[in-house]
Amino acid sequence: MTSTTVPRPRAGVLGALALAADTADEIVLGTVRDVHGAVATRVHTLIGRRSGTGPVSSAVYAGIGCGLRATSRGLRAADRRVGARIEESPAGRVLVSAVNGFIGDRLAEDGSDLAITMAVRVRHRDVAPDRASLAEAFPSATGDVVVFLHGLAEPDTAWDRQADERGGRYGDRLAEQGWTPVYLRANTGLPIAENGVALAALLDDLVAAWPTPVRRIALVGHSMGGLVMRAACAVTTDADERWTDLVTDVVTLGTPHLGAPLERGVALGARALGLLPESAPFGRILEYRSVGILDLRGGLARDVQNLPNARYHLVAATLAASHRHPVSETLGDGLVRFASATGRPRRGPDMFPAADLLHIRGGHFDLLNHPEVEDALRAWLA
């Protein structure tokens, strides 16, 4: 398997505004129009009059929609000629990653400049997985490579959380032990399986073109990133030597192996809102979320196999000190419950029976840079 994706042009601020106009047309205006129509129908039915919003209201909505679409076209045309690139600023990079998390599947399908392509990232730029580019980006490359992949809607710089206060990231500490940290960025709105295939292809290319022979690989994934890494490990490639044979350790940080309750709650909310015509349009807003988010409902299929020769290390956080506390039982780390992060269902066997387990007190995003996790990583990857 070889990566053949052509890098997209970098999107500009005007292009992002065009996307906002599209969203306003499709979601906001559509919701207001449909709620108006449902309420009008209900009232007119009660008083025995003809239902509907009337020709004047319909013309107003149609006119606003045409204006938004025209604005979007104009902004996109201007973006190709002028305008600052949105990813030139930290806030812009965070925004692009967030948008990809929520509607990245649609962006990729439409060929949008805002759609993220799975890539190695160095100094806020994609690095092509060829020997010359990798040698330039990693002048001190070693044969031990630790790969970091962020979670849903996060930028590749999510690992920088509190880096100034703590004196660096996980990768900086592991570099002191001879590892070369490689940070990836992914479109987390795509299906997890699709991202798994893209990651497998990228790692095939990375190993083949790495400046020095790769001796071992460690995978570290936060939240959804852990699911994508597990999915990639299950992909069959046509490479002469599989990169998975070099994987010695897989570390997941707050990964919803059994699914995330937040996604289940959103799905239930969407169904509940759909019970009444007046609230159904709001339910469709909830249904607008990406396939990547939908995939978090149940995690990976149970038949996805673990690598037989790799050690697994699972880190879970809970808001209370004990994972048995009622708050921890209900909310976990705020997004993922303890049982899901450790792959321990109430019924059935553990998903990772021989794995190392680490429990910390904290929230979901504390796992991105936490002293206890850092100490564990240094010990596990010694």
Image (cartoon, helix red, strand yellow):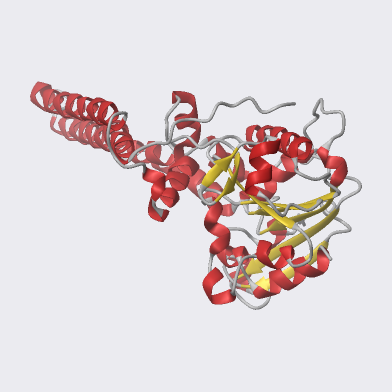
**Within the image, what quadrant is residue 181 found in?**
bottom right
Note whether 47 is above or below 323 in the view shown: above
Left or right of 249, for residue 367: left
Confirm whether residue 269 shows in the render. Answer: no
Seen at 56% across and 47% down, the residue is 264
Q: In which quarter of the image is the C terminus?
A: bottom right
Note whether 28 is above or below 147 in the view shown: above
- In the image as oriented, which residue stretches furthest toward the right? 309
Spot occupied by residue 313 in the image (x, y as percentages of width and height)? 79, 60
Between 165 and 210, the one nearer to me in the picture: 210
Left or right of 239, for residue 92: left
Confirm whether residue 115 shows in the render. Answer: yes
- In the image as oriented, which residue stretches furthest toward the bottom? 321
Seen at 17% across and 24% down, the residue is 62
Between 354 and 34, the one nearer to me in the picture: 354
Note whether 119 is above or below 364 in the view shown: above
- In the image as oriented, which residue stretches furthest toward the left? 56
Seen at 82% across and 65% down, the residue is 380
Spot occupied by residue 359 in the image (x, y as percentages of width and height)? 72, 70
